[in-house]
Amino acid sequence: MDVAAARAHVEQAWEHSIVPALERYVAIPALSPAFDPDWAVHGELERAVALAAEWISARRIADLALEVVRLPGRTPLLLLELPGDADDTALLYGHLDKQPAMTGWGEGLGPWTPVRRGERLYGRGAADDGYAVFAAVTALELLRAQRRRHARCVVLIETCEESGSYDLPFYMEHLRARIGRPSLVIGLDSGCGNYEQLWRTTSLRGIAAGALRVQVLEEGVHSGDAGGVVPSSFRIARQLLDRLEDAGSGAIRPACFSAEIPAERIAQAEVAARVLGESVYARFPFAPGVAPTTRDGRELILRRTWRPALEVTGADGLPAPLHAGNVLRPETTLKLSLRVPPTVDAAAATEALRALLCDDAPCGARVEWTPDAPAQGWSAPPSETWLDDALERASQVWFGREAVAMGEGATIPFMAMLGAQFPEAQFLITGVLGPGANAHGPNEFLHLGAAARLTGCVASVLAAHAER
């Protein structure tokens, strides 16, 4: 590959074409269906797909077939097919749906207001995961411009990922013959430890989540009258959580929610910890005086990638302090999100949560567990030598530094699905959700330089895949 020409091609595409398109994409509140049940009426997902389709068509890549696939009652999916020189298939993946707005955006910033500050493009969805379709198509365009061989490429861009990709299996079945059996899968919806080198995600945690409701009264009563007689629903909820989590250490108690960590993943965590140093924890916006759970970099990486962890992500039945009278409340509902190791069965973990929380409730309280759909974790298959070599070369060419492998603590439901469906495939799961990118939270941004360099890496790996 002519590196100078390739760099110029990618940089020009990003600066003059991709960034303006992403700015328009940020302005679209394309909420995932879990956050907008009336998505079909509002049409924002369709707007996002139409924007991407219009941009792709304008690039005029020879022989690239583009189709917006719509199954009845399902969110739309963008399908691209590019014939190849090698008798093989590579599958590239991303999504266009978004998380809700969230509060706390900085001055001048907002979820649907694209703002560029240097190499950062702020706004909801640019990094998670709007950039993916533009990066994937530009990588294919670069291969053609450089006259490099590549396999037949299929690009799937869904609009249901932030809701757990529950529509995707229907599309995978519907498009089974057109997708074929890829020997390489490239997913562009993951994280990176920094913006200075290529990061390969080797595992993803699963999720067992749901709402825990504890009811003790039919209606609220004066706390002075009932306190000490009627059990507090909040205290009972705390007792139930104690069955699951050690309040002092945060460790998850039942062994069924843990898994043995493979030696290879421990070794990868050691390398990543060496590369990242204190940024393993310093990248998070701690409040003044707050410290991480430990300063051991390797252990922190393992805690966020291979150990279970609980977070209470929402609550109901609790009035805002300004409106909280002296009332013993009738009930408390807590939204629980339990991240489980990649190899733990997320469906079994969700059922185990129900039994753990609901059986033998204190004081006979009415306890209900309403589960979310479980999301299975994923651990990459052993990497073939050609892929390891290709990743290292790509990182050195495009970033000037070594490639690094590390697990991620989040979940991409698509990966477990593909891992089971294509067990013989090799996987490059990567992304640009690095320090401060804050996907799902306020002030989300896309690091434009890293995204452009990652685009080049994708092209390099696709070329190596065809020549292996």
Image (cartoon, rainbow, N blue to C red):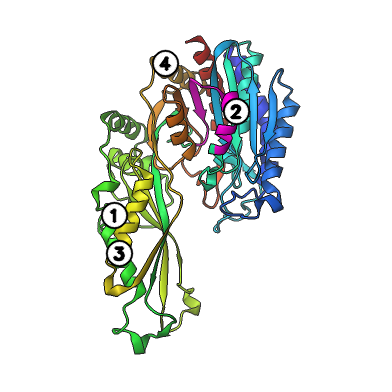
Residue 439 appearing in the image: yes
Query: What secondary structure is marked by label 2?
Result: strand
Q: Is residue 187 magenta?
A: yes
Between circles 2 and 4, the one closer to the viewer is: 2
Q: Earlier in the sequence, mark 2 or mark 4?
A: 2
Identity of the amino acid at label 2? Answer: Val
Q: CA distance from mark 2 to mark 3?
A: 45 Å
Crowd rating for badge 1 (residues with CA inside 10 Å; few <14, some 14–19, many 20+): some
Q: Quadrant of residue 386?
A: top left
- Count of numbered marks: 4
Magenta segment boundaries in residue numbering: 170-189
Asked whether, in this view, residue 372 is left or right of residue 267, the answer is right
Q: Nearer the viewer, mark 1 or mark 3?
A: 3
- First in residue order: circle 2 vs circle 1: 2
Q: Is residue 16 visible?
A: no
Residue at numbered disc 1: 250
Residue at x 61% of width, y 14% of height = 84
Point out residue 232 in the picture as x, y percentages from the top left corner.
Answer: 34, 76
Q: CA distance from mark 3 to mark 4?
A: 49 Å
**Residue at mark 1 to residue at mark 3: CA–CA distance:** 14 Å
User: Pointer 4: what residue?
Assistant: 389
Q: Quadrant of residue 353?
A: bottom left
Residue 9 position in % (x across, y down): 65, 21
Left or right: 228, with 287 as reference point = left
User: Which residue is pictured at 32% across the width and 40% down the height?
Assistant: 306
Earlier in the chain: of badge 1 and badge 4, it is 1
- Callout 3: SS: helix
